[in-house]
Amino acid sequence: MADVKLLGLWYSPYSNRVEWALKIKGEEYEYIEDDLHNKSPLLLELNPIHEKIPVLIHNGKPICESMVIVEYIDETFEFFAEKEPATGKSFFLKGEEQEKANEETYEMLKVLDNELKDKKFFVGDSFGFADIAANMMGLWVGVFEEASGVLLATREKFPNFCAWRDEYINCSQNKEYLPSRDELIAYFKARFQATKSATK
């Protein structure tokens, strides 16, 4: 890639997914931090419909949506694009919506746990793009669990997935690119607390 810029947020799994893909591929890029509470003119210009990060800018051409960007960089991982939204809902919604999201998340965890049987990573012993695509499950689910007190993935129910998650966090290829877990937990604890206070 020639002129590459990435518009993102440090605490976003979707933004970090793209960062890791670029770094693993060895691509040089300029990172631009945005603020969703005070969206920059650049974000509004590049993604005027959804007004969301991440946005990859390659030779002046904007590419939106993290899975589309990862596909652009290497290949498609539709499974996570389709299934991951339910995971976030398991932590951020309540009542029947949360129960439905939990069911979908458990089904996804069963698939992942089966896929990871006798494997260190999704493609065997090597960390790859499939693992990058699963970054929500690799880091953020554990952060959400600790920050919210809602536990979804236990070693008793999903031993292969939990073993992969440990490898994911500690993998030398990946570890240096991960945002601070403590900072993520503090950020999302505050968000969960604010949501809880607002619903009282």
Image (cartoon, rainbow, N blue to C red):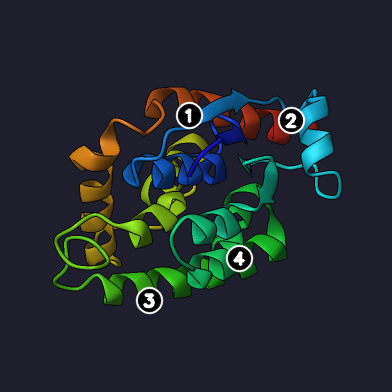
Camera-side residue of 11 and 92: 11
Counting residues from the N terminus, which is met first, the one under dot 1 or under dot 3? Answer: 3
Where does label 2 land, which residue?
A: 36
Q: How far apart are marks 1 and 2 (CA)?
A: 16 Å
Q: Is residue 142 visible?
A: no
Question: Mark 4 or mark 1: which is in front?
Answer: 1
Numbered label attached to residue 67:
none
Q: Is residue 20 above or below residue 176?
A: below
Q: Distance between the residues labelled 4 and 1?
A: 22 Å
Where does label 4 land, which residue?
A: 101
Disc 4 element: helix
Q: Residue 189: where, in percent of width, then height? A: 55, 29
Specify whether 172 is left or right of 197. Answer: left
Residue 133 image-quadrant placement: bottom left
Q: How far apart are marks 2 and 4 (CA)?
A: 25 Å
Where does label 1 land, which residue?
A: 184
Where does label 3 land, which residue?
A: 111
